[in-house]
Amino acid sequence: MLSPERLSLPGPEYLAQRHVLTYMEDAVSQLLENREDISQYGIARFFTEYFNSVRQGTHILFREFSFVQATPHNRASFLRTFWRCFRTVGKNGDLLTAQEYHCLLQLLCPDFPMELTQKAARIVLMDDAMDCLMSFSDFLFAFQIQFYYSEFLESVAAIYQDLLAGKNPNTVIVPTSSSGQHRQRQPPSDCSPLDGVEASLFYQCLESLCDRSKYSCPPSALVKEMLSSAQRLTFYGFLMALAKDQGINRALGALPDKGDLFVDPAMDHELEKLVAQVSGLSVSGPTSSSGDAANLPVRNSPRMNCPWKPLHHRRKMDAESEGSNEETDSSEN
């Protein structure tokens, strides 16, 4: 069913709001760079598979960071994929450092910036050393806030610093670049003699920021409710409250509630099927009395179709092949 919003907005505005052109440009770019392979099974099938992957949220796998953070849907898809791939870390009770979590992120996005991982870890650890251990759930919900709302938090940091200095926060400039390159900013100091800023004034500034921001912001009503019981707060106290608020988590829609964080029936079903296939390969038929292993029946493992791979993998493989040829040639000389 079509959303009523689609009919209430002009066409170009709706396309921009839903970032349709971003996906069209990416699809066409992949089509042109892989036209020889795609010609074997047709352009229509390529576009069908591409947009199915966008709908399912698998289109961000192993892509460059500039694409992963390009749209809210991409960010939510990356968060969901990270949770589904590595939830067993939390299920097993393992504690990891920021560097180790960053290694997991890079398994999905090879050029994921360490800066974002460190910012997420700082929400959890506050003033503790950055090499302290963190639980999966603590890191995940902090990372969700830092990654999905990164531009919003950049402006919130500026507002907080201005309030501490007694300046007019309305002079804060909201980031407008979509390149993902944010201004370098020193973490706000929580060492104010007044222990932070006044919560009501801070919320007024945030409400104004959300009204004029072009980027994703947490629902102002939920932020107001979250701050209603506080008189003063620090910057990292605010970030921690955002990370722990289940209402904001549900509004974002990428992760389940904390109580259901380690429950994923769909993924569990796939894992059970995989385990059953592997177990089936090890089941032996009737053996001879001598127990000769050579008489075991041979089973062929099922071949699984590989989904469409991102372009940068092909370019990387080609570059590595060229490099290996050069090394071979030089060795021969």
Image (tube, helix red, strand yellow):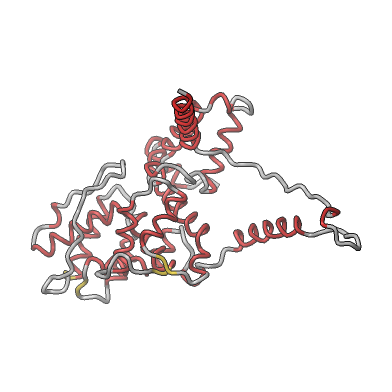
Examine the image and state in which quarter residue 271 appears. bottom right
Residue visible at 45% across and 42% down in the picture: 63
Rendering coords of residue 193 (x, y %): 11, 74
Rendering coords of residue 261 (x, y %): 50, 67
Q: Is residue 142 left or right of residue 43?
A: left
Examine the image and state in which quarter residue 326 appears. top left
Rendering coords of residue 43 (x, y %): 58, 28
Examine the image and state in which quarter residue 41 appears. top right
Decide: is 321 above or below 333.
Answer: below
Residue visible at 89% across and 62% down in the picture: 290
**The C terminus lies in which quarter of the figure?**
top left
Query: From this viewpoint, is residue 144 visible?
Result: no
Decide: is 175 above or below 135.
Answer: above
Query: From this viewpoint, is residue 51 visible?
Result: yes
Decide: is 122 above or below 195.
Answer: above
Q: Nearer the viewer, residue 55 or 5?
A: 55
Rendering coords of residue 274 (x, y %): 67, 56
Decide: is 32 above or below 240.
Answer: above
Q: Is residue 318 left or right of residue 279?
A: left
Residue closest to the far left: 166
